[in-house]
Image (cartoon, rainbow, N blue to C red):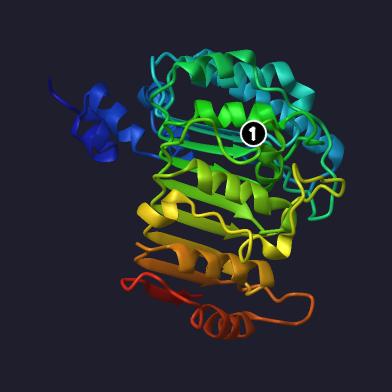
């Protein structure tokens, strides 16, 4: 077939078969894939076949605008998302990410999106219901119930490779511990698991406060935490539930702490990593890498790291990324570096292969 040289020069992809264009689009982030739709009529259909779907309200909503405008933009976003998934023709989805800060007002629509992802056997599922306007001490409002299909589907799900759970919109933790534990067990095949501070406070408050009934297959655990006292039992719960863990990422930041939190059993936070020791299997048998992001050298940060270094028999690498924030007392990155040098390097280290790296 003869190709007009002017067209070929202007758009070299126009000569490729659609099957090749589908492959190209599948390697692009969702936002970049969407931009290809302006290239030609051909691309308007091609980009809708992408296997990496990211529906993020920040594409539409500017959180510096008024409440009324944000609400209107959020509705526009959800209408766009509904139209997009209803016209999607591919049988499977590789990665599906959905982010909405006010899901409770649009529960039916949100559940439709989750069902869409589950029916297409997505391997990477990320649900983010946190609100960027929240401050550290705000009390959550609104509640979201995941569709029953989510749990039914997960009973037979074996293909999830990565799961990120952010339940920041939940207003309370009563009666939710068992539900989150059940959800966690249904995600047992996920090799990469990310959880937030809400999850850490809630998951040990169910019937089983120490671990999941069956071990998880998680190889890389990412904790979004401040290592607040309310989160300590949740951290221990996950370490005990992940006996095959190889990499632990501690992503430090402000946490949304419940003021009326009650631990599932009496414990002394100060003794959590010093006296009330639990020999988690992952520390003794499999954990090799620890990453700490946003390190400031607080007491809980240091005690947790010392605990990991003492019991981490096979550790090979500890990467500490120092926080660039200046805290309320005027401490800065140089203070955090000094704390790391004095409080971490002088710890008892069991692994002879361990390398410790400090990074800005």
Q: Is residue 233 left or right of residue 42?
A: right
In the image shown, does 92 or 70 lie closer to the viewer? Answer: 92
In the image shown, does 37 or 193 lie closer to the viewer? Answer: 193
Q: Is residue 266 above or below residue 203?
A: below
- The residue lying at 23 percent from left, 40 percent from top is 9
Q: Is residue 349 left or right of residue 307?
A: left
Tally of marks = 1
- The residue lying at 62 percent from left, 24 percent from top is 80
x and y percentages locating residue 11 in the rendered image: 29, 36
* Other residues around mark 1 within 10 Å, as few (<14) / some (14–19) / many (≥20): some
Label 1: which secondary element: loop
Figure quadrant of residue 324: bottom right
x and y percentages locating residue 344 in the rendered image: 53, 78
x and y percentages locating residue 194 in the rendered image: 54, 44
Q: Which residue is mark 1?
A: 208
Q: Is residue 118 visible?
A: yes
Task: Report the quarter where the N terminus lies.
Answer: top left
In the image shown, does 342 or 321 lie closer to the viewer? Answer: 342
- The residue lying at 79 percent from left, 55 percent from top is 136
- The residue lying at 42 percent from left, 75 percent from top is 357
């Amino acid at each position: 077939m003869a190709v007009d040289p002017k067209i070929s020069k202007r758009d070299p992809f126009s000569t490729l078969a659609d099957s090749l264009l589908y492959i190209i689009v599948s390697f692009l982030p969702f936002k970049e894939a969407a931009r290809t739709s302006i290239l030609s009529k051909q691309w308007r259909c091609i980009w809708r076949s992408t296997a990496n779907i990211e529906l993020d309200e920040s594409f539409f909503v500017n959180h510096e605008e008024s409440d009324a405008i944000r609400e209107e933009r959020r509705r526009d976003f959800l209408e766009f998302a509904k139209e997009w998934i209803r016209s999607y023709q591919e049988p499977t989805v590789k990665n599906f990410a959905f982010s909405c800060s006010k899901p409770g007002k649009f529960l039916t629509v949100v559940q439709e999106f989750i069902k869409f992802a589950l029916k297409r056997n997505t391997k990477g599922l990320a649900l983010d219901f946190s609100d960027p306007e929240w401050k550290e001490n705000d009390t959550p409002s609104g509640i979201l119930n995941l569709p029953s299909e989510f749990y039914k589907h997960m009973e037979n799900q074996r293909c999830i490779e990565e799961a990120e759970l952010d339940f920041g919109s939940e207003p309370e933790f009563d009666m939710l511990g068992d539900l989150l534990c059940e959800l966690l067990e249904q995600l047992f095949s996920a090799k990469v698991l990310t959880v937030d501070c809400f999850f850490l406070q809630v998951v040990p408050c169910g019937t089983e406060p120490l671990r999941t009934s069956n071990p998880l297959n998680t190889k890389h655990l990412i904790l979004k935490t401040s290592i607040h006292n309310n989160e300590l039992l949740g951290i221990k719960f996950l370490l005990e539930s992940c006996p095959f863990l190889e990499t632990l990422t501690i992503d430090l930041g402000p946490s949304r702490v419940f003021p009326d939190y009650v631990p599932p059993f009496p414990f002394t936070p100060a003794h959590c990593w010093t006296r009330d020791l639990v020999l988690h299997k992952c520390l003794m048998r499999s954990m090799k890498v620890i990453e700490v992001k946003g390190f400031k050298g607080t007491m809980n940060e240091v005690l947790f790291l010392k605990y990991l270094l003492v019991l981490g028999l096979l550790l090979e690498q500890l990467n500490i990324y120092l926080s660039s924030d200046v805290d309320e007392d005027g401490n800065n990155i140089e203070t955090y570096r000094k704390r790391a040098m004095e409080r971490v390097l002088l710890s008892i280290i069991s692994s002879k292969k361990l390398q410790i790296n400090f990074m800005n």
